[in-house]
Image (tube, helix red, strand yellow):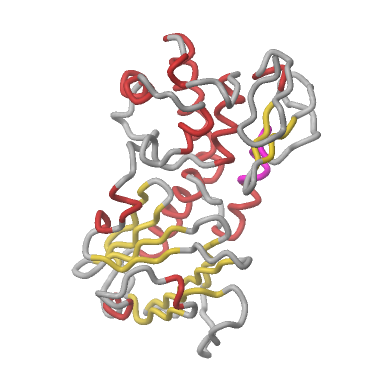
Amino acid sequence: MPELPEVEALRDFLTEHLTGREIVRVLPVAISVLKTYDPAPTALEGHRVAAVHRYGKFLDVATADGPHLVTHLARAGWLHWKDSLPSGMPRPGKGPLALRVALDTGAGFDLTEAGTQKRLAVYVVADPRQVPGVARLGPDPLADDFDASRFAALLDGERRQLKGALRDQSLIAGVGNAYSDEILHAARMSPFKLAASLTDEETARLYAALRATLTEAVERSRGVAAGRLKAEKKSGLRVHGRTGEPCPVCGDTVREVSFSDSSLQYCPTCQTGGKPLADRRLSRLLK
């Protein structure tokens, strides 16, 4: 799933390629992708793009005097930029194409979604805060005002495990499965440690790991073409998705805990005192 760094890179890319251009056609190919119907997608046509914003994992294409096109790529969605869009009309039900946006230059982008679980979401709204997922977002962890004290206040009394807390979009916006693994590895903390149990030193260490991990990932992704962002993300991960490989810090074997619809990766030496985590749902550190 694209997370904050990749979505931020897409925002940069689209800011460069969309700002000032007129949207001439919006073609929903998979009706399931549309989560709003009034205004219709065609309401975007004839308007120029004023800016592109990011809210957590949401992308917002804002027109100068019209509605916003807000997108959440979900687990298997992606954005494909084309300097020259195909001239023919796309056929519904043929391939992963979900929505096409054409510009006055002949360029544009496609939103696609692989697999059978259709979670890619597109909203056409007068205000991004009309999107429920945007309205409930917590603070952006890379915002200038997101300092260590604000982070500590968010975790104060938080009874969940760190992995779940970091992934909660209403607590902190933009962090998902992959970067929560990376942040916890950088902070040298177990994913199952309770947030409320952190000492002041541990909270400061986790905050530093959060900011550094996301900032470094954004910098790696900046300037990378949209089509290569997925590969760039994977190449920069140290533990997530690297089960069985050596930890780049200590050399221990990266291990995995599997759940019904996801998994996490961690280094026992760096994060759990050398003890493996039980690989079952609701896992707890083996005593």
Q: How many numbered marks appear?
A: 0
The residue under the point 66% across, 20% down is 285
Q: Position of residue 77 (x, y in %)?
A: 54, 61
**Direction from residue 271 to residue 217 in the image, left or right:** left
Q: Position of residue 118 (x, y in %)?
A: 53, 66
Out of 111 and 259, give the one closest to the viewer: 259
Q: Is residue 235 inside the magenta stretch?
A: yes
Q: Is residue 154 inside the magenta stretch?
A: no
Q: Where's the C terminus, which quadrant?
A: top right
Work out which residue is located at the far bottom of the displayed protein and give it. Answer: 88
Q: Is residue 266 above or below residue 12?
A: above
The residue under the point 51% across, 42% down is 176
The residue under the point 53% across, 31% down is 163
The residue under the point 39% across, 46% down is 56
Q: Position of residue 19 (x, y in %)?
A: 33, 63
**Direction from residue 58 to residue 209 in the image, left or right:** right
Out of 251 and 271, give the one closest to the viewer: 271
Q: Position of residue 211 (x, y in %)?
A: 45, 28
- Magenta range is 233-240
Q: Quadrant of residue 22?
A: bottom left
Q: Is residue 159 above or below residue 274?
A: below
Q: Is residue 266 above or below residue 203?
A: below
Q: Quadrant of residue 251?
A: top right
